[in-house]
Amino acid sequence: MSESFQSRLAAAKKASEQLLEAVGTVIVGQHEVVQQVLWGLIAGGHVLLEGNPGLGKTLLVRTLSSCLDLRFSRIQFTPDLMPSDITGTNVLVMGEGGSAGGRFELHRGPIFGQVVLADEINRATPKTQSALLEAMQEHSVTIAGVRHTLEEPFFVLATENPIEMEGTYPLPEAQLDRFLLKVLVESPGDDDFAQILRRTTGAPAPTPARVLGQTDVLGLRALCREVEVAEPVLRYAARLVGASDPGSPAAPELVRRSVRFGAGVRGGQSLVLAGKAIALLEGRAQVSFDDIKRAAPPVLRHRILRSFEGEADGVTTDRVVAELLGSVERLPANVAHAAAAS
Amino acid sequence: MARRVRGRLWLGRALTGAAFGLCAGAVAAGALWWLRHGELRPFAAGLGLLGALAASVVAMRKRWSDEHVALYLDEKLGSNEQIVTALGLRKESSEAAVHLRQSAVAALGRSGAKLRGPKVLDAPQLLGPVGAAAIVWLSLAPLPPAPPLARAPGVERVQRGNVKGLELIEALRDQKGRSPEDERRLRALADEAKKLRGELAQGMEKREALSRMAKLRDSIAELRSELGKEQNRQGLEAAIAALNEHPESRKAARALGDGDITAFDQEMQRLANQAEKQARESAKHALEEAERAAREKGAPGLADALKEQRDGFDKRSAEADALRELGRALAGKLDPEALEDLKEFGASGDPKAARRLAEAMGKALSKLSEEERKRLAEQLQKQLQQSPGGAPSPMTQQELEDMARRLASPEGQKELEEQLREMANPEPSREAQRDGALGEAERGLSEAERGLGMVPMPMPGSPGEAPGKSSGQGQPGGKDPGGPGSHHDSGSGDHAGQSQAVAAPELRAKANVQRSGVGPMHAATLGRAPARPGDTANQRGTGSLGSVAPGEIGAVEQSEVPEEYREHVGRYFEP
């Protein structure tokens, strides 16, 4: 029984490595970004990718979907995009020859895919953005009063440009909270940049192999839920999230000064789920303190709302998260002291 | 593994506690060494054991939970919280739980054997050997020498060959007293002073000497204030009231109320010197009334003193008359100052003027020629004949004849000169002599105390030792050469000069009491110390309750009466 569980862990680790390798045949560098996207996929959450145009966000999602034997759809968000353009609509189909007796037929929108790319999500109006809300949270959509369940796994990958750019609509907090992770896509280094140039200016790259199917992904998600979390690790995650609240006595000075709202309960849940995903991808059956620490920046950065003073001071949420990680102790003081001394 | 972790933690804490205990033991051993409790020093090492026990108790109370041990092991083995997670799942039977338990056991088996556990030795434990060594050293070190015992104040011995001032007390041996009992007490004082002088010459404790001087002071004060004692109080007040009835004797009443017998005697001398017969009779009558009142009110001693004054009053009056008659006869031979004194003596009877006049007349008599002397005798005879009905003055005819007869011969003249010298320094009354001697004895006692290094308490009535010196630029027109304190300056110069500091042993503050200055306020004040306007405010009692003087303040407060009884005792002494 134990060996079976261990083999499942090993298989999960191997599958993740294969997936990373397959994506790596197309995407140069960005290993951390790809890994974080994978955390989101396995943990059953959705991922928001933020970065400047041209950094390969869309390519990454398309490559990932190519590696997964899942139905892929893409929505290009524009200011005139309507909610029904996402969810779909009932279309009246006339009888033959235009005779009466026509019927309404559902034309499903792109949301009915399994891997949905919401490209440049912050270019659409909030009304349209909110059309994603039900789908992301409930994994179902309602069209003309009829509820339609989306096929699992349902995984939304959204990209957005930095909100300071023109023609963008900041995502509402409620919608941001529904993303498990917010992944920052950084510019590649010189070596990676050269490699990108080589690959994109030569012969067309081969299509990556399909590594995981629908069953595999669902199995990984189920196994992720079986990963155990020790009580001290859970308390650590809770202390981290709690300290992000400026009203908390444990909040560091930077949080009290620069944060208006901290991460809530959903942030804690996401932190543990992301930690479990990390542990699973490393072939472990338990979450460690380090898993929580690794998961904290992408999980918490979009859940912390800065105050006016914080924004004026240029304090980023990543800096706030780093401050939290530095101030909240993992171990009880006596244990930490003994461990450091011996 | 958990046992090893907990055991090492306990051992480390016990060692730390023992180290601190040994340090405390070293401090205790040092204190015992300093306090010279040598036999107890080795037991200070027991504090080390106590410290270890206390630390063990603390370690038991702060014993790590299983979770803490697991966290420690995860941290040290780098097992990614595998052990603590497995610990939380020890009762679970899921696949993941079983897998985690097996993994944790494997991890502990793989690396646990190499893990030594928490650090046992720590830097503070180095204090243990240091403390133990200090205890050993302090236990073997010789004890410090005992410090010399602090000497009680005043135990030092004093040796004085000749203590100045005590001779004034010894002089009381020859002083006549009011009664044989009084004379015995005066002699006892003199004997005590003589004995003290002898012991001081041989050497004695300073405190003993000062104590005996204090007793002497008490005894002297008691003798001086006998007239004001409780049993004499009513008689004294009755006598004062009787004297106050007559305007001439009010000053005398005031002096008597102050207990100043010398001033009282001088005032009676002044009254006897008065030329006006009616005034003298009035004063004499006042004395008789005062004597009778004192005797009726149960103050026989005071009555005797007043009787002595009354008895000597006629003699003093006769001497004053003789002086005036002779002065008138010698008027042409006296210098202007003597004539002024004659005039003043006639008007007020001032004893000082009498003294100066007698001295001037003695000098004038010694310069008379034979012829002038005979002429003076004839003139006196003529004065006698011009008043056939009797003497023109209170002097008897016999006395005038006697004076004229003496002037007729050179021997008689010498005799008269001698008599005039005696008149210049009239003998005070026996009571005044006694009071003056006791005052001198008190002054001598203060001097003796100063000789032993003690600052004596200011006593009522002790005069300043240095005369006042004025550097003002005015031209004094008065005759007085300047006495202690002040003189009447009738000059017209400005007074911008500044007096130098008076080198007197004490300064007195005058009480500015808005009361009638007619007389003392006996039986009129509510305080414990009778006072009168213009009296000094710093008269301090001697502390001897048996000899509270009328002018004393704070006598009860200075006494040895317990504080809780002072109010009651003070009420008893209220006038």
Image (cartoon, coloured by chain):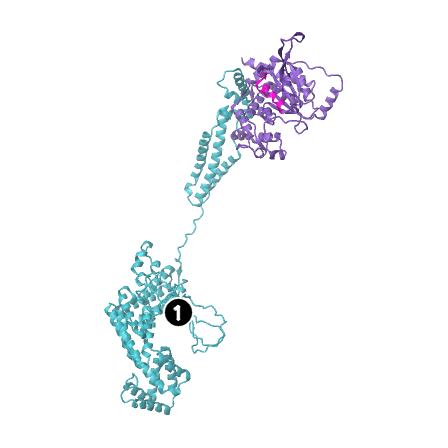
Viewer-nearest residue: B404 or B36 = B404
Name above or below for residue B147 compared with residue B399. Answer: above
Viewer-nearest residue: A102 or B542 = A102
Q: Position of residue B279 (x, y in %)?
A: 31, 78
Residue tagged by mark 1?
Answer: B463
Q: Quadrant of the C terminus of chain A?
A: top right
Residue lying at the far front of the rendered structure:
A100
Residue B512 placement: quadrant: bottom left
| Residue drawn at 32 percent across, 75 percent down | B248
Q: Position of residue B417 (x, y in %)?
A: 35, 84
Could you tell whether A99 is left or right of B308 in the image?
right
Q: From the rendered image, report the letter of the chain displayed in cyan.
A: B
Q: Position of residue B122 (x, y in %)?
A: 53, 33
Residue range highlighted in magenta: A126-144
Q: Is residue B392 among what the camera can see?
A: yes
Q: From the rendered image, report the letter of the chain displayed in purple.
A: A
**Is A142 a magenta residue?**
yes
Residue B267 placement: quadrant: bottom left
Viewer-nearest residue: B125 or B298 = B298
Residue A115 placement: quadrant: top right
**Is A98 a magenta residue?**
no
Could you tell whether B497 is left or right of A160 in the image?
left
Residue lying at the far right of the rendered structure:
A202
Q: Position of residue A46 (x, y in %)?
A: 61, 21
Mark 1, secondary structure of its residue: loop
Q: Main secondary structure of the magenta part?
A: helix
Report the number of numbered marks: 1
Mark 1 crowd level (few <14, some 14–19, many ≥20, 10 Å Cα): some
Q: Chain of mark 1?
A: B
The kind of residue tagged 1 is Pro
Q: Is residue B367 among what the camera can see?
A: no
Residue lying at the far bottom of the rendered structure:
B371
